[in-house]
C-alpha cells in the first residue's frame, strides 16, 4: 500500500483549492486535492508540508492541519500499479499565495461546484466527505 497525503486548502467564503493533474501523468487533466506520496521516514504531516511547498509554493504548519478522512483502492489495481491510500487533511491557514508549480492549473472552487469537476476515483469520496464537513 502506498500512503499519499492531500490537503483541502479552504479560504473564506468558503472556497477550496483544487489542482489539475499534469496531462502526461496518470489521471492527467483531472482535478484533485494537492499533495503527494509519503516518503520513508516522513510523518504524514511532514510529507504534506513538503509536498505543498513543492507543488504550490506555500508554507503549512503541522498545527494547522486537521485530519478529515481517507480513501483507498477497493481492490488490487491492475499491475504494475500498487494500491494507494489517500489521507485528506483540511487547512484554513497558510503562508504565501498558492501558485501552480507542478500541475496544469489550480483553481479556487466553490463547494457547490466541487462535485462537477472531473476527478480521479479516490478523490471523489474525499470531496464528498469534505462537503459534509464544511
Image (cartoon, rainbow, N blue to C red):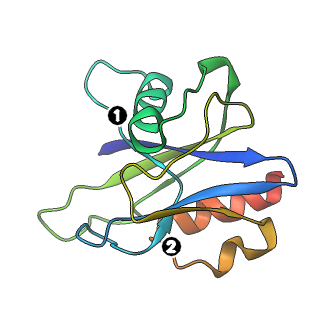
Residue 119 coordinates in the image, percent (x, y):
50, 73
Q: Secondary structure at mark 2?
A: loop
Q: Residues within 10 Å of mark 1 (few under 14, many from 20)?
A: many
Q: Secondary structure at mark 1?
A: loop
Looking at the rendering, which quadrant does residue 65 occupy?
top right
- Compared to residue 14, the image places residue 116 above or below, namely below
- Compared to residue 45, the image places residue 2 above or below, namely below
Q: Residues within 10 Å of mark 2 (few under 14, many from 20)?
A: many
Looking at the rendering, which quadrant does residue 78 occupy?
bottom left
**Position of residue 46 in the picture relative to residue 62 (left or right):** left
- Mark 2 lies on residue: 119
Residue 90 coordinates in the image, percent (x, y):
68, 41
Residue 26 coordinates in the image, percent (x, y):
27, 69
Residue drawn at point x = 60 percent, y = 20 percent: 62
- Cα distance, mark 1 to mark 2? 21 Å
Pick the quarter of the image with the N terminus: top left
Residue drawn at point x = 34 percent, y = 66 percent: 75
Residue drawn at point x = 41 percent, y = 36 percent: 51
- Most extreme residue toward the left is 80
Q: Looking at the picture, tell me which residue is in the foreground, 62 or 93.
A: 93
Tally of numbered discs: 2
- Mark 1 lies on residue: 38
**Which badge, 1 or 2, comes first in the chain's sequence?**
1
Amino acid at each position: 500500500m502506498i500512503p499519499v497525503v492531500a490537503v483541502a486548502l479552504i479560504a473564506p467564503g468558503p472556497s477550496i483549492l483544487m489542482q489539475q493533474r499534469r496531462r502526461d501523468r496518470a489521471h492527467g487533466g483531472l482535478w484533485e486535492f494537492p499533495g503527494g506520496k509519503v516518503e520513508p521516514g516522513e510523518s504524514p504531516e511532514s510529507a504534506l508540508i513538503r509536498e505543498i511547498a513543492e507543488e504550490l509554493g506555500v508554507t503549512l504548519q503541522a498545527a494547522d492541519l486537521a485530519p478529515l478522512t481517507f480513501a483507498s483502492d477497493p481492490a488490487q489495481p491492475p499491475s504494475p500499479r500498487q494500491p494507494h491510500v489517500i489521507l485528506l487533511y483540511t487547512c484554513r491557514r497558510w503562508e504565501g499565495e498558492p501558485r501552480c508549480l507542478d500541475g496544469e492549473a489550480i483553481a479556487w472552487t466553490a463547494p457547490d461546484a466541487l462535485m462537477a469537476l472531473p476527478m480521479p476515483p479516490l478523490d471523489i469520496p474525499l470531496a464528498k466527505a469534505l462537503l459534509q464537513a464544511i
